[in-house]
Amino acid sequence: MSDDINPAANLRAIQARIAGARDAAIAPADATRLIAISKGHDEARILPVLEEGQRLFGENRVQEAMGKWPPLKARFPDIELHLVGPLQTNKIGDAMALFDVVHSLDREKLAVAFAGARDKEGHCPKLFVQVNTGEEPQKAGVAPKETVAFVRHCRDGLKLPVIGLMCIPPVEENPAPHFALLKNYARELALPFLSMGMSDDFETAIRFGATHVRVGTAIFGSRA
């Protein structure tokens, strides 16, 4: 990684772009929250962003997050940590102990595991259901046609705290139709939050009502 990266300055630039995209949008969400995706980056890159006032961070892997975030959360107790990558059921306990929000609820087995851990521990992180809007076989997520039934099962049947939907559009496609699809499902299900948009397309996501955008490279630079 290059030593000339300035994460704090990059953060300010992204915040300005978010504000600009919201101003330009016809009907943006009431608020758009920035999740700084810190996967693959160490404390030296993360600290300047914390010191700039950023408190929402996202990680892809439970094991990596366990290795770096507990001491940072001790120093900055108002950090809100989001898991945005896939979660295996055998990591549920660790994830529930560290993360405030999980964006990758994507299958029945994981939903049942969350319900069981919730009953045992007495708490559960807030959950986004990940939708595979492009129906890509290599990508995690609920199929679009199964989204409504799956959310209702998790939220109303298992009583899980499902608060929104998340998607990652196919890289080679225009993301706008995928964001529009996710917004329509959220409206049908009366879900308040939409986690969509990353470094390359978050301004488009804001136009479609994103409440959470996930930006990593544009803040922290390339990963090692």
Image: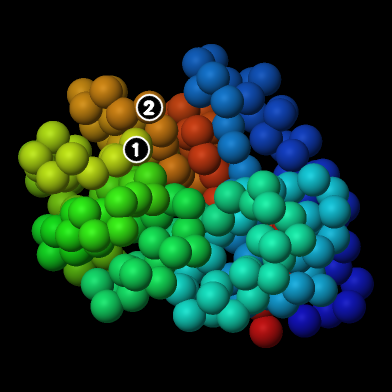
Q: What distance separates the C-alpha of mark 1 from that of mark 2?
A: 6 Å
- Residue at (53%, 15%) from the top-left corner? 26
Residue for badge 1? 164
Q: Residue 192, which numbered label?
A: 2
Residue 80 is at least partly visible in this image = yes
- Residue at (30%, 51%) from the top-left corner? 122
Q: Which of 127 and 184 is in front in this view?
A: 127
Where residue 108 sits: x, y (%)? Answer: 12, 58
Q: Residues within 10 Å of mark 1 (few under 14, many from 20)?
A: many
- Residue at (44%, 64%) from the top-left corner? 97
Q: Nearer the viewer, residue 152 or 15?
A: 152
The answer to whether residue 180 is left or right of residue 33 is: left
Which colour scheme appears in the figure? rainbow
> Contact, CB < 8 Å: mark 1 with mark 2?
yes
Which image quadrant: the N terminus? bottom right
The answer to whether residue 202 is left or right of residue 165 is: right
Q: Where is 207 relative to 23, above or below?
A: below
Report the label total: 2
Which image quadrant: the C terminus? bottom right
Lower position in the chain sequence, tag 1 or tag 2: 1
Q: What residue type is labelled 2?
A: Pro
The answer to whether residue 72 is left or right of residue 203 is: right
Residue 114 is at least partly visible in this image = no
Q: Nearer the viewer, residue 220 or 49?
A: 49
- Residue at (48%, 52%) from the top-left corner? 100
Where residue 70 sits: x, y (%)? Answer: 62, 69
Q: Where is 150 relative to 118, above or below?
A: above
Where residue 13 sits: x, y (%)? Answer: 80, 45
Choose top left, top right, bottom left or bottom right for residue 50.
Answer: bottom right
Where residue 39 sits: x, y (%)? Answer: 59, 71
Q: What residue type is labelled 1?
A: Gly
